[in-house]
Every structure is written in C-alpha cells, then in structure tokens.
Image (tube, rainbow, N blue to C red):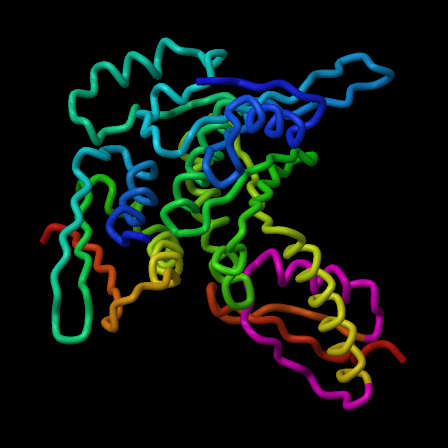
Amino acid sequence: MPNFVGESIEEAIQKGLNALSATKEQVKVQVIEEEKKGFLGIGKRAATVSVEFLEKEVPVKEKQPEKAPEKPIIAAASSATNEHSLPELKELNERDAITQLSLYLTNVTKEMGAPALIRVEQEAELLIFHLDSQNSGALIGKHGRILNALQYLAQVFAHRVAQNKLNVVINVGDYREKRKAVLQRLAERTAHQVKTTGQPVFLEPMPAFERKQIHAVLSKDPYIKTHSEGNDPYRYLIVEPEENVL
Amino acid sequence: MTDVKELVLTIVRPLVSHPENVKLEVEESHDFFEYNLTVDPEDVGRIIGKQGRVAKAIRTIVYSIRLEETKKVRLNILDGK
C-alpha cells in the first residue's frame, strides 16, 4: 500500500494523486499520521497518508499501517478462516483506534453513496473527524440527524476498539460551526421571548451536546434559568424566567 | 449504486464480537423490503444499545439512502427467539 508524506494532509494526498495520476474520486485515502507543527520546529512531523485505487478490494488486515503493532492483529486475522470475519480489534492505542475508526467511516460513507475523505483533528479531549464529500447533504440529513447517527456509531466503535475513552465528534464541512451559530441565535431569541412574556418556553427535542450548548449560552443570563425534561432522544429544554431576581 | 445489504453489514460487522455470525436476509412484503438482521446472541444488546440508541442510529442511516425502488426499506433486528 503506497504511503505519501507531505507538509500537510492535503499536500500528502495531492502527492499520492499525482503519483497514481488519479483523481480524488478514484482513490481511497487513509490518514496514517497527521502533521504536527511542533514548537520552534521541535517535534515537527510530516503528515502521512495512504492512497490507493478504489477498485482494488484489499482485505482489511492489509490496510493496517505497517507501524501498527502487528502481532495481536495479524494473529487474529490469520486464525480467522471465515472470509467475512474481521480481525478482532480491541484495546488499541489511540493512534491505531483513530486509524481503524477512519477506515470504518470511509467504508460506511462509501456504502452510503457519499464517499468521504477523512481528516482527523485532535483537540484536547476531542477527536474531530472532518468528512469531506461531494454529497455532503446525504451525510448531514435534516437537522443533522444522519450526522448525529454517524457520530453516535463512531463513538460506539471507538469505545469498542480503544483502550482509552475517546470522545468523537464528526463534522461535515462547517456544519457544526453553522449549527452552533443557529443554536446561539435560538438561545438568544428564546431568552428575549421569556423575558418579555414572563412565560416559560419549551424547545424542540435535541441531542445532549446541543442542549449543552444552549445551557451554556443561557447560563450567563441572570434573569432566566434553564433545565431539561423528558427522556432521550426526546429530551427537551425549558427556558423560564428566574423568579428571585428583582 | 448503493446496496442496502452491504451498507448494513458494513455498519454492523465492526461493532460486534462475532462478525462471522452476522446474517442479513431480505424478504419482500406487501409494503416493505424487510431486512432481517440476526447477530450472535452475545451481540444483540450491543447492536440495539442503551434504549435502542445504536439500533436507532443504524436505522437513521439505512433509511436515509435513496433507492430507485418504490417500496420502503425496513430493518428488523431479530433476537433469535
């Protein structure tokens, strides 16, 4: 499996595409290592990606990056006689878990008819998977329903394969940023409504991390209070006036 | 061309402990294409999830893809009873 190295992931992919004289649609890209900027040039590392043609159906075990700890995985793979059985992946370190999760997302998006290029970003406790697809609408869905479903499955997958707890966020384009702005406006509008009418307002059900964003925005306002009621996935938020503040 | 069967298997196999026991049969009923999924008894809980959240997520994705068929797709998870 050809690996390509570049200053950034995009550059590494481009190198791979040039080398194979292929277009983005014809190949499967897997990020093996993200670039690291380092500090004053110390700890700087180039990005590595693998690029291969889509038509070649290679069994999963061969897509393992060569640096991966081979013993347990290969042992499981060779003992698996059934063609369909995948090697049992467990207790992986963070990097292998990320690789496996990228692979999982690549396969799922491909089967959804919206093959996506996957870029991984690590931010404190969060792993953000950026999916870049021509058919991004099919990956988002109404109110991000499909995106949230994908994110939930990715989270389940991550918990399953990784030894440490990983928090996974999936983003398509700038959807999460846009959605955050929408929620921010919704929170402000709702707060205004509550203050002018003095009546509580019940918001539409939304997933936990979206409710959290609204709670966070409104917690700064001393004249209103917020809480949630109902059970997931229909748990919703209630915004009401704070009675004790004069 | 997206294939529902492949999609379901792609999603489900990596999530279970016994991928070799994952089976998916298609049955055409009056209104639906029924995809009957069976997994190893040990994996049933895993594929349904807390309060059916995993099952719900899988269905959300599977039902989202566009097909040329006029009939809808329905995904059933059989618990082997």
The quarter holding residue B30 reads: bottom left
Residue A222 shown left or right of residue A176 in the figure: right
Residue B8 position within the rendered picture, expressed as x and y whole percent measured from the top left: 29, 49
The front one of A156 and A171 is: A171
Identify the residue shown where x is 32% and y is 53%: B1
Residue A27 shown left or right of residue A167 in the figure: left
Residue sticking out furthest to the front: A21
The quarter holding residue B28 reads: bottom left
Identify the residue shown where x is 77% and y is 23%: A37
Identify the residue shown where x is 43% and y is 42%: A156
The vertical placement of B72 against A23, above or below, is below
Residue sticking out furthest to the right: A246
> Which portion, as a residue range, is magenta?
A196-223
Residue A219 lies in the magenta-colored region: yes
The front one of A12 and A111 is: A12
The vertical placement of A82 against B26, above or below, is above
Residue B25 lies in the magenta-colored region: no
The vertical placement of A184 against A158, above or below, is below
The front one of B45 and A75 is: A75
Identify the residue shown where x is 80% and y is 12%: A42
The front one of A153 and A141 is: A141
Residue B53 position within the rendered picture, expressed as x and y whole percent measured from the top left: 39, 56
